[in-house]
Image (tube, helix red, strand yellow):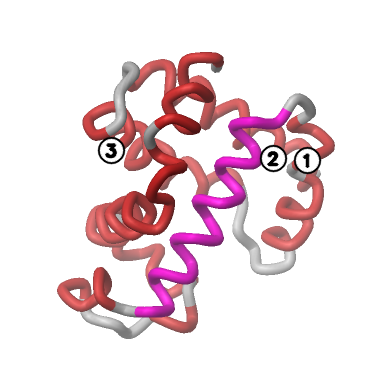
Amino acid sequence: MADVKKIWNDVIAKDLQGHGIKIFVKFLTACPDQQPIFKKFASVPVGSLAGNSDVAKQAMNVMSKLGEFINSSNLANDTKALAAGHKTMNITLTNFQKMFPIIADYASANAGGDKASWMTALNAIGNAIDANQK
């Protein structure tokens, strides 16, 4: 997790919104079944997602939280609020697991590190969220 944390802080954190929008567009393109979950841009055509302000806001929220979790020394505690909030929307580990490979692919290709390290870090976050939703 140390190399993921360093890459996050040295590269990705410098442009959270830019990276976040690219990740979100890749995610919603690869997993169109997930777009209806996001009510504010559920009906936005895929080709218009990158320029949509609601997508940009959601991407920033996701990337900010992800940065907090990557830098966390206590995932079990730090994921509690997000886990509870997402549980009320029926967003579970299954949903997160659809996004994790997209993040890992993007991050390893555009920021550095290997995909396996990114997946290990993201799965640790997912497991903490899942444990807090039970």
Q: Which residue sits furthest right?
A: 77
Q: Is residue 70 magenta?
A: yes
Secondary element at image label 2: helix
Eyeballing the image, is 82 above or below 9? Answer: below
Eyeballing the image, is 66 above or below 4? Answer: below
Eyeballing the image, is 122 above or below 37? Answer: above
User: The disc labelled 2 sits on which kind of residue?
Assistant: Asp
User: Which of pointers 2 and 3 indicates the residue nearer the eye?
Assistant: 3
C-alpha distance separating marks 1 and 3 = 24 Å
Residue 106 image label = 3
Report the magenta stretch's main SS.
helix
Q: Nearer the viewer, residue 92 or 83?
A: 83
Q: Nearer the viewer, residue 85 or 62?
A: 62
The quadrant in which residue 91 appears is bottom right
Q: Dot 1 surroundings within 10 Å: few (below 14), some, or many (20 or more)?
A: some
Label 2: which residue? 130
Secondary element at image label 1: helix
Q: Dot 3 surroundings within 10 Å: few (below 14), some, or many (20 or more)?
A: some
Locate residue 30, reporting x and y percent: 25, 53
C-alpha distance separating marks 1 and 2 = 13 Å
User: The disc labelled 1 sits on which kind of residue?
Assistant: Asp
Eyeballing the image, is 3 above or below 121? Answer: above
Residue interval drawn in magenta: 53-72
Q: Which of the two labelled residues, at mark 1 and mark 3, occupies the earlier sequence position?
A: 1
Q: Dot 2 surroundings within 10 Å: few (below 14), some, or many (20 or more)?
A: many
Q: Nearer the viewer, residue 12 or 88?
A: 12
User: Which of pointers 1 and 2 indicates the residue nearer the eye?
Assistant: 1
14 left or right, relative to 79: left
Label 1: which residue? 78
Residue at point 37%, 40% (across, down): 103
User: The disc labelled 3 sits on which kind of residue?
Assistant: Tyr
